[in-house]
Amino acid sequence: MQSWRGSMLGGLALAAAALSVGPAPAADPNPAMSRPDQVAWELMAQIARPAGSDNVVFETWASDADTFVDKPRWPDAVRKVLINRVQPVNSKQQGAVSPARHCAAGRVAWCIGKESLRNRPAFDFIVDNNLTTQRGLAVFFGRTMDFPIDTIEVKAEWLPLSELKAWNGVSAEDAASLYYINKARFGGETVPVALVALHITTKLVPSWTWATFEHWKNPGRCDDEGCRDTFGAAQPVVAANQKPEHGYDKCAPSESLRRLFAEAGVADIWLNYCLKGTQTDFITTTGEPTRLGNSVAETVNAGVPHGRSSCMTCHAEAAFDKRGKAAKADPNIGAPLPKWFIGSGTREAPQFRQADFVWAVPFCAKPGDAISPCLPPSAATAAH
């Protein structure tokens, strides 16, 4: 972690040579804000490194099933927990030809598997502050939640290989050369699953940094807001198609990205994943709301329509009341509004307290003696 943070902060500026003219170049004090696309790929390079067995680093982190339980425990063995999230999508409203529709038609037992994982600093902060239950949140109410600066949270979206062809034309036989693949267990059956999307967020700045990645074969990858990557893509800007879910060309990697992955020991299969974009502020310099959304995580799994996704705004809404219950999540864009938190309270005593941009805390906190709502009975068990 120390070496990673050192590389992300740009390192120290070189001293000026004795005969040189002018001062030494200054180090970038805040690359997360000034070079967010590069930082996003540096994060990817860290979490996609091999970590033994069939896994990469982020797969060894704590899941909701490790965190929001009676006895939270940092995993000593990898457990891939994929949640059955079959959610029909109204294609007339969203223009989406999503795998969820195929699943809803009963062709397979399940479809998109959503996996939420957090690194050790995030896990320890949640557990040490008793934020795993609504009772613990009620006690915490009134205090300011502030995750450690080295917190990293990941949201991964997986699709059974058997569903790929119906979605984007990739056969199960061809998937191995295009996708990062692992296994998951559901309903008593172990099946191979392909990673189709990945979202990374960190606490490098107070409002966090947000980066969303999609496999280049995702039909809606650059829909609505387009794709922008000034570091990892040979073509930095890709305009959105006029019609959604029509697919995009492969995002050819830049030489800078190839070097980064080679130095980090990341497999070439990860070059098939594209940075859709990063988000560092709620609004542009002209006051327009910024937008960033993942065509799988938001449109398919969360049912958020194209064009209504703002990672920062949505997660700024993450809050809980004095009973430890989560506030309502709405697909807002732009800067947060005080009225979202005041509710029936006042500015001095608002009804809701922010959960520091982490929805998992109020959403997943155990209510009383009941199981966490993030762990339905259909949650998968270990696959390995």
Image: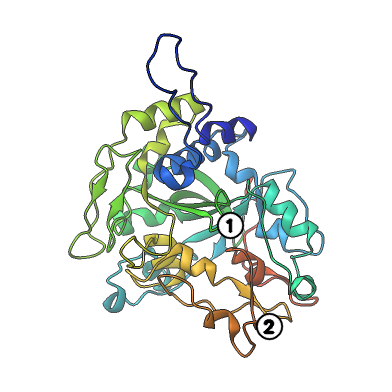
Q: Is residue 115 left or right of residue 120?
A: left
Residue 125 is at least partly visible in this image:
yes
Q: Which residue is mark 1?
A: 116
The residue at 26%/62% (across/down) is 245
Q: Is residue 160 above or below residue 299?
A: above
Q: Which residue is mark 2?
A: 349
Q: Quadrant of residue 304?
A: bottom left
Q: Secondary structure at mark 2?
A: loop
Q: Secondary structure at mark 1?
A: strand
Residue 201 position in % (x across, y down): 53, 53
Residue 21 position in % (x across, y down): 37, 16
**Mark 2 surroundings within 10 Å by alpha-carbon count, few (fewer than 14), some (14 through 19), many (20 or more):** few
Q: Amino acid at mark 2?
A: Ala
Q: Earlier in the sequence, mark 1 or mark 2?
A: 1
Image label count: 2
Q: Is residue 241 above or below residue 259?
A: below
What is the C-alpha distance between the residues marked 1 and 2?
32 Å
Q: Is residue 342 left or right of residue 85?
A: right
The residue at 73%/69% (across/down) is 143
Q: Quadrant of residue 176?
A: top left
Residue 111 is at least partly visible in this image:
no
The residue at 38%/32% (across/down) is 257
The residue at 35%/65% (across/down) is 98
